[in-house]
Amino acid sequence: DIQMTQSPSSLSASVGDRVTITCRASQGIRNDLGWYQQKPGKAPKRLIYAASTLQSGVPSRFSGSGSGTEFILTISSLQPEDFATYYCLQHNNYPLIFGPGTKVDIK
Amino acid sequence: EVQLSESGGGLVQPGGSLRLSCAASGFTFNDYAMNWVRQAPGKGLEWVSSIWGNGATTYYLDSVKGRFTISRDNSKNTLYLQMNSLRAEDTAVYHCAIHPKYYGATTPFDHWGQGTLVTVSS
């Protein structure tokens, strides 16, 4: 099975900060990766699909990059509504695997 | 408007069974593969099972193989998860979601249900 690692596991940041989260796959997954945001008690919401395509309706401060085994989610200027937990998901093959998550909270 | 609505969760004793349902509307249900994803209290997201649009092919997390069965009734626009021999570690909120893959490419379509809580405890 593919293993997904995600770093950092948590971070504290201020409004306006630039934030980057990295996801690494144990083997190449082409660009079959999505980034999801989840707030407490809510369903996940996809921000980025195909590694770098912005989901419709998602603010342009979110961006994704990478292919193969290393992927990055960037929030260019953190907003109050962005404090949440972020997960990557590989869907190149089965089992589908989510990264362990990165909790972004207020410094 | 796309809607996915889960039902069927509840409290069940270890070794018991539950059947979850996910009612879908607002899209061509039989065109899309579907997933069940769970989240144990305070933990991360975990994929459980997938089923293709025509129901012909299914996939399972190793720890649920032989205990859980995913199915769908395209005439009723409904996805199911039959869960047998339940264990304490199956306690989680179970979400249905549209699979990211659509005929070999990633679909821009992304929708999740709000989830239904399954608690396995004596």
Image: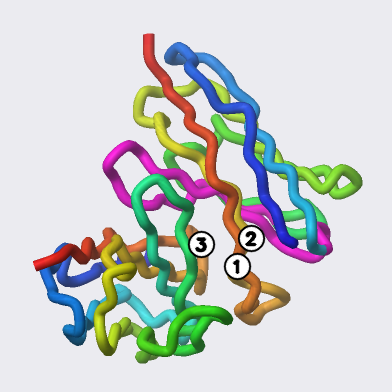
Which of label 3 and label 1 is nearer to you? Answer: 1
Which residues make up the magenta segment? B28-51
Give residue B110's mark. Answer: 1
Amino acid type at circle 3 is Tyr
Q: Nearer the viewer, residue B57 or A21?
A: A21
Residue B117 lies, with reference to residue B34, above or below; the image says: above
Q: Residues within 10 Å of mark 2 (few under 14, many from 20)?
A: many
Q: How is the structure coloured here?
A: rainbow
Identify the secondary structure beneath mark 1.
loop
Residue A88 lies, with reference to residue A65, above or below; the image says: above
Q: Nearer the viewer, residue A19 or B28?
A: A19
Mark 2 and 3 residues: CB-CB less than 8 Å, in contact? no
Q: Residue at x 31, y 70 (%)?
A: A82
Give residue B98's mark. Answer: 2
Q: Residue A11's spot in the image, x, y percent?
A: 13, 68
What whole-number distance in Å separates the C-alpha atoms at marks 3 and 1?
19 Å
Report whether A27 appears left or right of B2: left
Amino acid type at circle 2 is Ile
Q: Chain of mark 2?
A: B
Q: Which residue is mark 3?
A: A94
Mark 1 and 2 residues: CB-CB less than 8 Å, in contact? yes
Report whether A91 appears left or right of A86: right
